[in-house]
Image (cartoon, grey):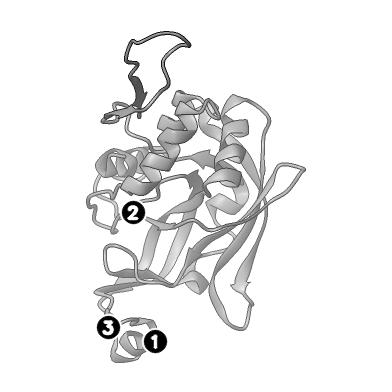
Amino acid sequence: MNATEVLRRMREKNGLADDAPVGIVSSFGTVEEVTDDRNLVLVATTDDIDLDNEVVVPAGLRGEGYFFRNRKIFVDHRYDLGSAVGKLRSAVPFPSPKNQRGWRIRVHIAKGPLGDDVLTVAREIGIGASIGFTPIDYGKPTADEVKRYGRDGKTPKSIVRSAEWLETSVTAMPCNVACQGGAAVTDDRKAAELDALVVKGRIARASAVALGLPATPVRKFHGTTACPPPGSTRKVLRVHLW
């Protein structure tokens, strides 16, 4: 995923200036349930420190903004018609309104090749959620915020206290991008799992690429043992390609 391109698309889609602050924050492997009626239950965002040492305060995400009016669920921050794969059913504070550390969302995934593959990925290797937002109030953390949001010896360098929630995507390989831009992060283990679903014929390669798999993955050859045909003295080499 090209972070600069994602931010450019988000600004263009929402009619924002080229230098308007926008951000992306993702939750990794957060699918909680895949129902028989094509619903996914996901934790869309939390108050954890992201990969850019930033915290987006869940309670500060406006629950009546553009995303809640539009309600569409996209694939990997792609906004063309074919990448709109679902619809928001509900969004509630997680784990509770009085002790909110995130948002839990229920989304319905539409029927179709890409939607079907999204459900397969969610069931077999898990799927994450990634939200796009525009910050309203953000800056360096106060002493109280350092104490509240610092974890495992890490201190956030920035706190987004309030923001407009613009959109939500499902993605197999979430990234985090700071408000002013930054590099995306690729999870090699997730990439291998996603590629394996393609090799097994469980999902289409086009779907895997839409969900974040590099379009030209590096493949390796591994020799495996194989028995020769009966009565033959020939050596047989079976090659596994991934």
Amino acid bearing label 1: Arg
Distance of label 2 from label 1 (alpha carbons): 24 Å
* First-in-chain label (3 vs 1): 1
Question: Mark 2 against mark 1, which lies toward the viewer?
Answer: 1
Residue at image position (28%, 76%) is 156
Q: Which residue is mark 1?
A: 148
As helix, strand or loop, the secondary structure at mark 2 comes to loop
Q: Position of residue 186 (x, y in %)?
A: 30, 47
Confirm or deny contact between disc 2 and disc 3 (CB under 8 A). Answer: no
* First-in-chain label (2 vs 1): 2
48 w.r.t. 224: above or below: below
Question: Mark 2 against mark 3, which lies toward the viewer?
Answer: 3
- Label 1 crowd (10 A; few <14 / some 14-19 / many >=20): few
- Label 3 crowd (10 A; few <14 / some 14-19 / many >=20): few
Amino acid bearing label 2: Val
83 w.r.t. 186: above or below: above
In this view, the residue farthest toward the right is 37
Q: How many marks?
A: 3
Residue 219 visible in image: no
Distance of label 2 from label 3 (alpha carbons): 27 Å
As helix, strand or loop, the secondary structure at mark 1 comes to helix
Q: Left or right: 172 with respect to 98?
A: left
Q: Which residue is mark 3?
A: 153
223 w.r.t. 122: above or below: above
Q: Position of residue 130 (x, y in %)?
A: 45, 52
Residue at image position (45%, 32%) is 208
> Image quadrant for the C terminus?
top left
Distance of label 3 from label 1 (alpha carbons): 12 Å
Confirm or deny contact between disc 3 and disc 1 (CB under 8 A). Answer: no
Residue at image position (24%, 52%) is 181
Q: Which residue is mark 2?
A: 22
Residue placed most toward the observer, 67 or 215: 215
